[in-house]
Image: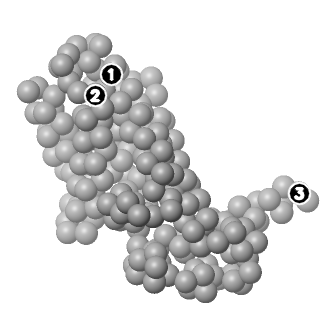
Amino acid sequence: MTDGRSRRREDTRQRLFVAAVELIAEQGFSATTVDDIAARAGVAKGTIYYNFESKTALFEELLRHGIGLLTADFRAAVDGLPPREALAALVRAELQYIRRYRAFAQLLLSEMWRTNREWQQTLRLLRGEAIEVIAETVRAGVASGDLPADLDVRTASSALFGVGLVVAVDWLVFQPERPIEDVQEALLGIVRRVAQT
């Protein structure tokens, strides 16, 4: 009985996450109301307050959930791979994630520019967790000699994360017919050229 109830609660929370991210990506956080989220998710307004104490709490959990999924995808992609292959796997994982969660990626991209939000510290920490997976791979590449010894690991990792995010959003908005393999190869070409300098 408890398993069924917790599964239903998790399903409800997932519907709320999806509804909230779609609405906020479409019309912005301030313009999105709890009523809008409830209507889009197909639940009563009270359900939101049962699961989250406020719209801000819902959004903060949305960030945790979305970036947590990306970080898990990154970790799964690089597991057991040598650095050069792991970098390619990271690029592919980021593109696949953003294609699957396009609205969240657009939202994440816009929120990274805003510094006055209550959840900015949470966003910074979560982003750091995702980038640290990339940094581990870059450090391993420097240690193995696959990447230049003088490479600034932190900047290179942030750049790879950011470029992947921007390129993926650009691809999905302006060139959605382009195969993911083409985008991945173009992005890897940029990464390889930077690594050789």
Q: Nearer the viewer, mark 2 or mark 3?
A: 2
Question: What percent of the width, then of the height, locates residue 100?
Answer: 42, 59
* First-in-chain label (2 vs 3): 3
Q: Which residue is mark 3?
A: 2
Q: Amino acid at mark 2?
A: Val
Q: Nearer the viewer, residue 111 or 188?
A: 111
Q: Nearer the viewer, residue 23 or 190?
A: 23
Local crowd size for mark 3, using a 10 Å CA cut-off: few (<14), some (14–19), many (≥20)? few
Question: What percent of the width, then of the height, locates residue 24?
Answer: 45, 75
* First-in-chain label (3 vs 1): 3
The Cα atoms of the two marked residues, 1 and 2, are separated by 6 Å
Q: Nearer the viewer, residue 43 or 177?
A: 43
User: Quarter-wise, where is residue 5 in the image?
Assistant: bottom right
Residues at badges 1 and 2 in contact (C-beta under 8 Å)? yes
Question: What percent of the width, then of the height, locates residue 187?
Answer: 19, 45
The Cα atoms of the two marked residues, 2 and 3, are separated by 46 Å
Checking the image for residue 153, the label placed there is 2
Residue furthest to the top in view is 144
Q: Which residue is mark 1?
A: 139
User: Quarter-wise, where is residue 145 in the image?
Assistant: top left
The Cα atoms of the two marked residues, 3 and 1, are separated by 44 Å
Q: Is residue 132 above or below residue 101?
A: above
**Residue 85 visible (yes or no):** no
Q: Secondary structure at mark 2?
A: helix
